[in-house]
Amino acid sequence: MKKTYAIEVDCANCANKMEAAAQKTPGVKDATVNFMALKMHVDFEEGQDPKSVMQQVRANCKKVEDDCEIYI
């Protein structure tokens, strides 16, 4: 299942850090961050609950870029 989320991030380097953190999150098959559009596209692994996985994605992203935001 693929979903798109609005994000708030200050720079392209920060967006890259968020993308890497999201990709390492269990339950995420793939994730890409588009800094210009301020969007995160997440492809979830089969059988995963997007809401609970995104809570962990948000927590992981906050670890690498504490002033970022993902609107779930």
Image: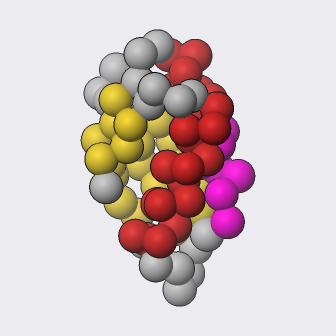
Please report the bounds of the magenta region as a residue range: 19-26
Residue at figure coordinates x 49%, y 49% from the top left: 58
Residue farthest along the bottom direction in this orientation: 47
| In-image side of 12 versus 29 (left or right) | left
Residue 62 visible at all: yes
Q: Quadrant of the C terminus?
A: bottom left
Residue nearer the viewer, 65 or 22 = 65
Relative to residue 61, is residue 34 depicted above or below? above
Relative to residue 36, is residue 71 depicted above or below? below
Magenta-highlighted stretch: main secondary structure? helix
Q: Position of residue 43 (x, y in %)?
A: 49, 61
Residue at figure coordinates x 47%, y 60% from the top left: 55
Residue 19 visible at all: no
Relative to residue 54, is residue 23 depicted above or below? above
Relative to residue 23, is residue 11 depicted above or below? above
Q: Quadrant of the N terminus?
A: bottom left
Residue at figure coordinates x 56%, y 59% from the top left: 56
Residue at figure coordinates x 46%, y 60% from the top left: 54
